Each structure stands twice: as structure tokens, then as C-alpha cells.
Amino acid sequence: MEKLKLRQLVEYLEDIETFEEPKEHYEQYQTTPQIAAEMLHYISDREDFYGSHVIDLGCGTGILGIAAALCGAGFVTLVEIDEDAIEIAKRNIEHFELTNVNIIHMDVNTIPESFYGRFDYVLTNPPFGIRSEKSADVAFLKVAINVYHIFL
């Protein structure tokens, strides 16, 4: 599989359907196609990225996870609490005809221990606790540490 050029990835991600009415209590802020593309284009340069298992915590409409899949991740798990965002993410996954992306309706804070250590890469654009729960970003980071696959 040939790696996408950054500009190509940005163009693909510009087709992502976004929130029409972001929910303030979930602190839904859309990651821009440019930021998502630059982030995943950089990460996908790592030798172990191709075929890896990626999780996107609080995926929203799925832009980071979809970018990971387009860049060669083997399997991508999206986790989102908001049912409306999940419906948009599902449409985005279908738009790109991605068969290696799965979405789970779940609060990130209730991730089961069976997820611990199962993922090679963890992506997130967490709520920063500005309008909702204080330190929500810290909770996301704690989960990210738990689900990340670490060799000791």
C-alpha cells in the first residue's frame, strides 16, 4: 500500500461530515481536516503503524480514526458517548467504504478492563473541561494510558 501524500489525505478528510449542532456539554469541537491529516500523516511514518490496532477515544464524527484507517492502520476502534455523533461517524465510515473501522457507543470512563493493553496507538481530541466536567481531559488521558499496548 502506497502512503497517501499529506495533501491527498487533507482532501479526503475535507469530505468528512461534521456536527451541525455540537453539544456544549460534551465539548464537541471538530478537529479540522488539516490538523487530523498532519497528525496521522506524521504518526503513520512509524514502522509499526501499518496494520496496527488503533483506538480513538471520544471520536466525535470519526475524523481521527478514519484518517488512521486511510493511513494504513489494520483495525480502528472508535469510542463515542453521543448517539448523534455516532450516526454521523457511521455515515463517514460508509462514505469511505472502510471495513476495518468499528464504532462503540460507550462513555470513555466506563471502558472495560478487557480493553487494557490492546491498542498500539491511542488517538483523542478530549473535552478539556472548559464547559463541562473539570479535568475531563485528565480522565481521557488515564484511559488512554490503560488501553495502550506497552511492552515491559
Image (tube, rainbow, N blue to C red):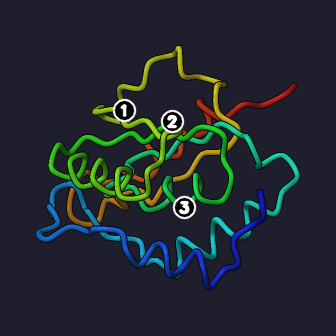
Residue type at tag 3: Ala
Which residue is under mark 3?
Answer: 67
**Location of residue 88 in the rendering, given as x and y in whole percent from the top left corner:** 23, 55
Which residue appears at 43% of the width and 35% of the height? 102
Which residue is under mark 1?
Answer: 109
Image quarter where the C terminus lies is top right
Question: Which badge, 3 or 1, is on the more N-terminal residue?
Answer: 3
Q: Is residue 5 left or right of residue 103?
A: right
Between circles 3 and 1, the one closer to the viewer is 3
Would you place residue 45 above or below residue 53 in this image? below
| Kind of element beneath mark 2 | helix
Residue type at tag 1: Asn
Q: Is residue 145 left or right of residue 108?
A: right
| Kind of element beneath mark 3 | helix
Q: Which mark is residue 143?
A: 2
Q: Which mark is residue 3?
A: none
Which residue appears at 30% of the width and 31% of the height? 106
Which residue appears at 49% of the width and 56% of the height? 66
